[in-house]
Image (cartoon, coloured by chain):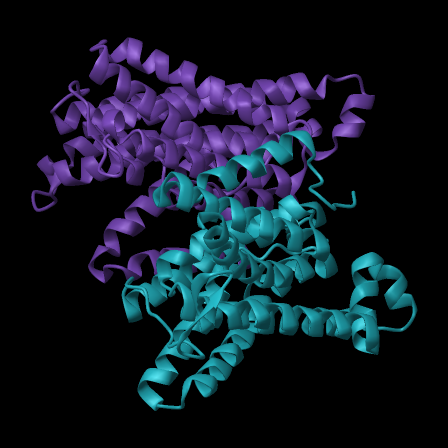
Amino acid sequence: MTRSLLSSRVFLGSVVVLALAALVPFLGRVVPFIAVPYALGVLTSAYYFGVFAMSWDLLFGYAGEVNFGPTFLIGLGAYAAALINNILHWPILPCVIAAAVAALAGGLMLALPALRLRGPYFGLVTLVAVLLLQDVIVVFAHWTGGEIGMTVPDVLSISADTNYWIALAFLVVSAGIIYGYARSPLGLILQAAGQDPVEAAALGFNVAKHKLAAFSLSAVMSGVAGAMLIFYLGSASVDVVVDLAIAVQVIIAAVLGGRRTILGSVIGAVFLILAGQILLPLGQLSTFVVALIALLVILFFPDGLLGHFLRARERA
Amino acid sequence: MLGYEIFVDGFAISSLYALGAVGFTLIFGVSGVLNLAHGGTMVVAAMIAWLVIGDLHTGVLGGALVGIVAAIAFAFATYFATVRPIQRSHAIPKEETEIFILTSTLLWGIMIQTAIAYLFTTNPVTVPPLVPGVVHVLSVRTPRNEVLIAALCWLVMAVLWLFVSRTRAGKALLAASINPRALTLCGFELSRIHLLVWAIYGVLAGIAGVLLGTYLGASSDNIGPLTASAFSIVILGGLGSVPGSLIAAYVVGYFETMTAYLIAPTLRSIPALVIVVLVLYIRPQGILGRR
């Protein structure tokens, strides 16, 4: 009973937030002094970021796997799409599908050690995976543009409005898939497998199969979101889709929003990107302030923004 | 000739890696904490030493000592600000403390990195060498400082070994890494041992940081790679195993040096990363790991 009430609260909340998000493009007609295209641009990136964070939370919160390198999967997808678009001149949709395939392969590569290793060992593999991907991109600078990055010939749209709608729709569909999966019986089994693999196996569940499914879904969503992001930006570079700093931001977003909530990740991502914009006048120090805020949240509200709200209800 | 050069150069850098990684692995062995702000501790030591030598004219040795004290202070700050509150928190489930400490020390490392970049820019600073001049080692022209670095690293590790195997506090430390519960039953205060291990860590990382500053220079951009290399060395050697970390430090150090000399300096870090991944696929507990 409580559970269905809670989920309906979450559902109601999401609908309200979604309605507000849909109003943003029309904001300019009401409050003329807001630079709407700029606000839309910031939110568009934030929505793709939200998908990154949700995919990460599926692995961490549900499968119990600490992935320090979400940008390995994101970067694989983004660069696969960018390279194919550049060299083979395929249109955007096949490129995005190719990105999903590339990220899926990467996800399975990560899943292989994850099924054998625990905790910090697996964390290191993912960390190293990012560093290696970054090195490979720099070594093959001839094709990838190295540290400078590469432009892609095709872009989703040149209209800020259209880009915003595409990102919002993509976010909603992704949230539906990931949240739906996490809340389904499959998600419950996954959660059990993550928290106590031995007991889950004793109950007759195939732990490896469920974790592989989670890795695959997380990888495909990350890769597709990475590809969409570069087709929105019109360029792919290490600083935007691979760098460890981005990986850390994805993790911060998910933990800030509340681990094991999926939808909280989106709140965390939007908060993080907006905070980054607001703190822009601080220059270099903005990263410092964001890290400090995240540290304080972890220390004092370890359940995160949405998690804190939900668990307070649960206790009541 | 080239072989000798690789041998001599690799030895100095590997010794530094070893010293840095030993402190890192000690903390893990005793309290199960992986400190992802590790590179920050080393760079803080080098930066403070450089600052003190340059602005206060204390001389190289005085500056180096201040740098080491700063590293100890930073290690305690890391422990009290980011590790202990999480270990004591009731809101964080026990099985998740590990990931929370990883995340909080990572954030702490990012904070110190941006703070250093803001205060001192990202340009590397070079601490003046402890001794000037060059000598010939195996017919390779080597700065005296490089020889001193290798010697000092081994001296410090010998002192550490004596401390752990000969003194009461050191034996308690060793016992804590084997069975903390039994140690508390013997009447030892575990929290004091944790303080001790963080202090030792500060000394080791501080010395390694200052020496690194005299050898390759230090900048805020080094913090991430330094943490990553210590992490890889410790995993390669086996988490919590000091001898394993020593072996792994030389493996990683020599592979990096060989790549830099024989293939290209820009590819320096790649083979070590590949080795770490291979080891994790084939032998996850590392060279001397006990699992």
**Quadrant (top left/top right/bottom left/bottom right) for the N terminus of chain A:** top right
Q: Position of residue B37 (x, y in %)?
A: 51, 59
Which tint was used for chain B?
A: cyan
Q: Residue furthest right?
A: B186
Q: Position of residue B112 (x, y in %)?
A: 41, 64
In this image, A19 relative to A212: left or right? Answer: left
Toward which corner of the image does residue B223 lie, by quadrant?
bottom left
Q: Residue at x 70, y 74 (%)?
A: B159
Q: Residue at x 21, y 29 (%)?
A: A150
Of A296 and A215, the residue lying toward us: A215
Q: Position of residue B114 (x, y in %)?
A: 35, 61
Which tint was used for chain A?
A: purple
In this image, A98 relative to A57: left or right? Answer: left
B106 lies above or below A40: below
Toward which corner of the image does residue A204 lie, by quadrant?
top right
**Residue A175 in sight:** yes
B223 lies above or below B77: above
Of B192 and B167, the residue lying toward us: B167
Q: Residue at x 24, y 62 (%)?
A: A282
Q: Residue at x 45, y 79 (%)?
A: B130
Of A304 and B200, the residue lying toward us: B200
